[in-house]
Amino acid sequence: MSSARIVLWLNLTLRPSCSLCRAQFIKGQLQTPANPAAMENGTMPCGEKRPLEAQETTVTEGAAKIVFPSANEVFYNPVQEFNRDLTCAVITEFARIQLEAKGIQIKVPGEKDVQKVVVDLSEQEEDKAELKEGANVAPGDQPRTAAVGEICEEGLRVLEGLAASGLRSIRFAREVPGLRSVIANDASSRAVDLIRHNVQLNKVAHLVQPSQADARMLMYQHQRVSERFEVIDLDPYGSPAPFLDAAVQASPAAGLLCVTCTDMAVLAGNSGETCYSKYGAMALKSRACHEMALRIVLHSLDLRANCYQRFVVPLLSISADFYVRVFVRVFTGQAKVKASASKQALVFQCVGCGAFHLQHLGKASGPSGGRVKFSAACGPPVAPECEHCGQRHQLGGPLWAEPIHDLDFVGRVLEAVSANPGRFHTSERIRGVLSVVTEELPDVPLYYTLDQLSSTIHCSTPSLLQLRSALLHAGFRVSLSHACKNAVKTDAPASALWDIMRCWEKGCPVKRERLSETSPAFRILSVEPRLQANFTIRDDANPSSRQRGLKRFQANPEANWGPRPRARPGGKAGGEAMGDRRRLLQNKRKEPAEDLVQRAARLKTFPCKRFKEGTCQRGNQCCYSHRPPTPEATAEATPTNCLETLNQNPPGPGATTGPGVD
C-alpha cells in the first residue's frame, strides 16, 4: 500500500475519536465555575456558593425578620424603611379598592373592623332601607374577607423585579392582605438563595415564590392578559430606565406600577444629556429640581406606555431623602392616548432670576362633553431675553405637566395610616408627608423657593408666613411642597412675585452702588412695583400640617446615610472598607497646600511698595523683593504692601538672605 493511501486511511479512522475528545474537552471547560470577581449582583449568577450561616446579620423590619450577609454581597439599605412602609400602605389601599369591586373585604391587623359605606346624599332614604335589610342577612351570607398571610384566589399578583434579600416581598406577604402570590425575583444566585432562606424563616413559602431571572425577560414573558401582574414594584440600584418598557407591558388594565429612582444627580440636572438618554428629557439645574425629577419620570413612563396604546395615571409621587418614588396606574385606551401630548410640556427657565414658563407640546380643544380636537400648541411663551432681568433662557423637558397626585387616593392612604399608627415604624413621617401632599396645589407645576427670591435681589429674607400672606392678599393661591421645606408653589406669575419682593426690599433697601448694572438684581430693582404688597399675617397663611407640628421633612437618620454602595460578589467594598475609602479620597480634587519654600520664592518676584517709598522697616525679614526694579519688571510686576513676612522669628546666624535683599 502506498504512503498516500496509508495517511488517508489513518485520517478517516481517527477523525471520530478526535471529535469526541474535543467535545468532552469543551464540555469540561463549560462546567468549570466562572470567576465570581468578574460578576456583579443583578447581572450574572455567582459560580461559588458559601454557606448562609457564615457572617450573617439579622434585621427586623415591620413584621418581617430577614438574614443577610454582613459583607456587601446583597444590597440592603435601612434608610429606605420609609419607602417600604409607604409602599405597603399604598398597596393595601389599592387592594381594598380592587377587592371591594369583587365583594371582598380586607382585614388589616390593628384596624377597626368597621365597614366603610359611601353614601350618596341624594339617595339617603334608599340607603337606609338597604342598611335595614342588610341587618337581617343570614350568617352564611356575610361578605367574603381576605386576611394577611392568607392566599386570596381573586387577589393581587405582585412582582418584585429586583428583590435582593427579599425583605420587601416578605413584608408584602406578612402585612398586606388580599394577595394571591408574590414573586421575589433577582438575577443573582446568591440573592435568590438568601430569599429562599428568609422565606422559610418567615413561614411565607405559600405566598412568596423566589425566582432567578432577568427582570426584563420575566416581565416580557408575562405579557398575556391572563399572566400579567396587578402590582409591579421596581426598586433598582440607580436608574429604572432599562425596566420601564417591560413593566408597562406586564401590567394589566388599571394595574399598579411602583418605581424608585436613586440616580438623582442625573434627574436633578447635573448631566442633562445623560438624563435625556435614559428618560427622554433634559433636566435643568433648578431650585425645583426634585419636583422636576418626579415629572420627568412620569413623562418617561407615559411615553413608553403610549407605544402600546396605553397611558398612566399618577396616584402618588414622592421625593424623599436621596430618591424619588412614583405610584401610577396603567390603563389601555387608544382615544385617551391622543391626549398624552397635551399633558407634556417644555420648561423655559431664566438663568438670571430663575423665572420659569411652561410650554405644552399639544393642545386639546372642544366643548366639554363633546368631541375633542387635538393639535399642536403655539409658542414660545417667552421672548429671547427674560422680561425681568434681561438674561437668556434655558430649555428643559419635556416633563409631565398634569397633577402628580390623586388626592382622593392619597386621602384614603392618609386616613388608613392615621387610624392605625402602630402599623408602621415610620407612620409619623408618612402622615406628615401625605398631609403636605394633600395641601399642595395640584394644577401648579414646579415652585420657587424663599431663599432663591431674596438672594436674587440681595435683600433680607421675609418669613414664609409673610410671603404667603402677601400672595393671598393679592388674590393668588399658594401652598407648600413636600419636596422642599421652603418652597413657594403659587399660581401667581413671576411679575407679581417680583413686585412683592420689590415692596419687601423697600423696607430694607439694598445699596444700589454695590450692584452691577447688568446684574439681575439691578434690573429687577430698577423697576417700580405695580402691585402694592400687604405683608400682614393671615390666619390661612399657616397650613394645617405646619400648625399641627407634623413631621413633614426627614432629619438625618444616621451618620453617612444615603445611597449605599452597589452589592458585589464576595462582599467587596462594604462597611469599614468603604469608610476607609471615603477618608482616603476626601478632598482629592482640591489643590495641595503650597509649600513654604515655593511660596517664599513666589513672593520674592513682587517688589515691595514700601521699600520704593523708603518706609519699609522689615529689612531682611521682608517677604517681598527689595531689588531696584527694572523697566521690564516695573511694567509686569504689581506693587504690594509689605504686610507679610516669611517667618516671624529673625533669621539665625549663618542664614542666607534671598537675592537682591539689602
Image: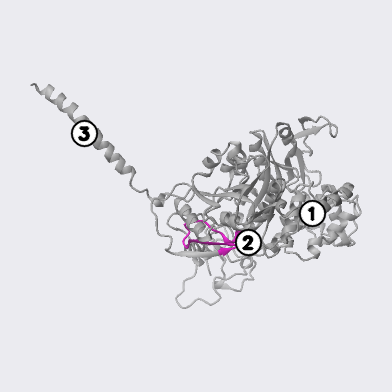
Question: What is the number of the mark on residue 50?
Answer: none
Query: Hey, what amino acid is under mark 3?
Result: Ser
Residue 277 to residue 107: above or below: above
**Distance from the alpha carbon under mark 1 to that under mark 3:** 86 Å
**Distance from the alpha carbon under mark 2 to that under mark 1:** 102 Å
Please report the residue visible at 60 percent of the width from the left and 38 percent of the height from the top: 226
Give the residue at the far left of this rendering: 1
What crowding class fits label 3: few (fewer than 14 Cα within 10 Å), some (14-19), or many (20 or more)?
few
Residue 470 lies in what quarter of the image? Answer: bottom right
Q: Nearer the viewer, residue 293 or 592?
A: 293
At mark 2, the secondary structure is: loop
Q: Which residue is mark 1?
A: 136
Query: Hey, what amino acid is under mark 2?
Result: Pro
At mark 3, the secondary structure is: helix
Q: Which residue is mark 2?
A: 639
Residue 24 to residue 144: above or below: above
Q: Give the residues in magenta.
A: 60-80
Residue 514, horizontal then vertical, whole percent? 78, 57
Q: Are marks 2 and 3 in contact (CB under 8 Å)?
A: no
Q: Which residue is mark 3?
A: 17
**Which one is closest to the eye, mark 2 or mark 1?**
1
